[in-house]
Image: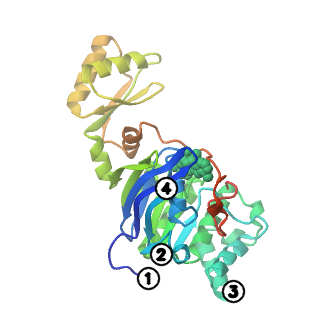
Amino acid sequence: MATRSDGPIIEVRDVVRTFGAVRALDGVDLAVEPGIVYGLLGPNGAGKTTLIRVLATLLRPDRGSVRVAGVDVVADPNAARARIGLAGQFAAVDAFLTGRENVEMVGRLYGLSPRNARQRADDVLERIGLTRDAGRQVGTYSGGMRRRLDLAASLVGRPEVMFLDEPTTGIDPRNRLELWDLIEDLVAAGTSVLLTTQYLDEADRLAARIGVIDRGVVVQEGTADELKDAVGGSVLELVVPDGHHVRAMETITAATGEEVLELAGRRLRVAAREGSRTLLEVVRALDAAGVEADDIGLHKPSLDDVFLAVTGEPTGQDTDVGHDIDDPASTVAGDRSRGRRG
Ligand SMILES: Nc1ncnc2c1ncn2[C@@H]1O[C@H](COP(=O)(O)OP(=O)(O)OP(=O)(O)O)[C@@H](O)[C@H]1O
Ligand SMILES: [Mg+2]
């Protein structure tokens, strides 16, 4: 694997990509240092997959420049492809081949000899915990197994940069933890990883830096702690009796002027810039209004709070979005972001 002395491994400048009237990317700037996991967060439709597809040479930007591992992705997509691996949001594997054959095939596409391809395939299948099922046709795999296979296939070429689009969506907790270990091992071995996720605990655990993307623009950037600090102060979480939430919300905003971050059933989350002083104000105001809280507590902001504060939306689960209706570039061989969801 080539080692790079300095400078960002991924450099995106003012990238715009539209689909008809939709500005999926609306001037994205991003610089990712080598040797880390960079987490990309954002609500459904924010442009995460589109950005990954641009970075992975599967989609041409309308405007802007994109460099990956020192290569201009738009000018020299072939050179870029030799350095990157991609595991997509929609696992693309051949259902008629066995797991091992799928991975071997990708190895062959990367130019490995049959013998090496076989060896690498066994290697990554073992890492990904699929050795026992490697001889079975992929058509018989579960969704989570397909996604793991997709990831295994993308590792065969020992890429310098890995793009992982929601790598653990739909994967059970045990395998998720194993994938996290695998991603950490990858980075320890020198691969740089850009990953998107809807799981904020995943970003918190894996990502050295995080970018929050919303409506095609990177709106926040930093370490998890920096992002949490930017929310400011603490967060007050309270549970009120059934039917009291609207009254509680009105009382709290009137008394503190603080923003209600989230209102979900009986649970309210409120920014508490003044910490325990806000807590006291809230307790007094609720008492005066005759609303009794069942539970009330202060905590440090979580990445969920960052997400809510920045995008105004709770993290959603992946919703299917458009599929390359107008995009000739999407027929590129090895487009791993297409195909059926695993
Ligand atoms: N091929 C396409 N044709 C038309 N519109 C598209 C296409 N690809 C993406 N879009 C639109 O671009 C926007 C960004 O989509 P994108 O898939 O990048 O979002 P995302 O952040 O990955 O969302 P999710 O969290 O749901 O995966 C959306 O409005 C989507 O509908
Ligand atoms: Mg997506």
Residue type pointed to by label 2: Glu
- Element at label 1: loop
Provide the residue designation for mark 3.
114
Beta carbon at label 4 within 8 Å of ligand 2 = yes
Q: Please report contact status of discs 1 and 2: CB closer than 8 Å, yes or no.
A: yes
Question: Quick check: 245 above or below 134?
Answer: above
Q: Is residue 76 left or right of residue 267?
A: right
- Element at label 2: loop
Residue type pointed to by label 3: Pro
Q: Residue at x 27, y 21 (%)?
A: 283
In this rendering, the count of numbered labels is 4
The mark nearer the N terminus, 2 or 3, is 3
* Residues packed near mark 2 inside 10 Å, few (<14), some (14 to 19) or many (20 plus): many
x, y (%) of residue 36?
39, 67
The numbered dot on residue 160 is: 2
Residue type pointed to by label 1: Ala
- Element at label 4: strand
Q: Distance between the residues labelled 2 and 4?
A: 18 Å
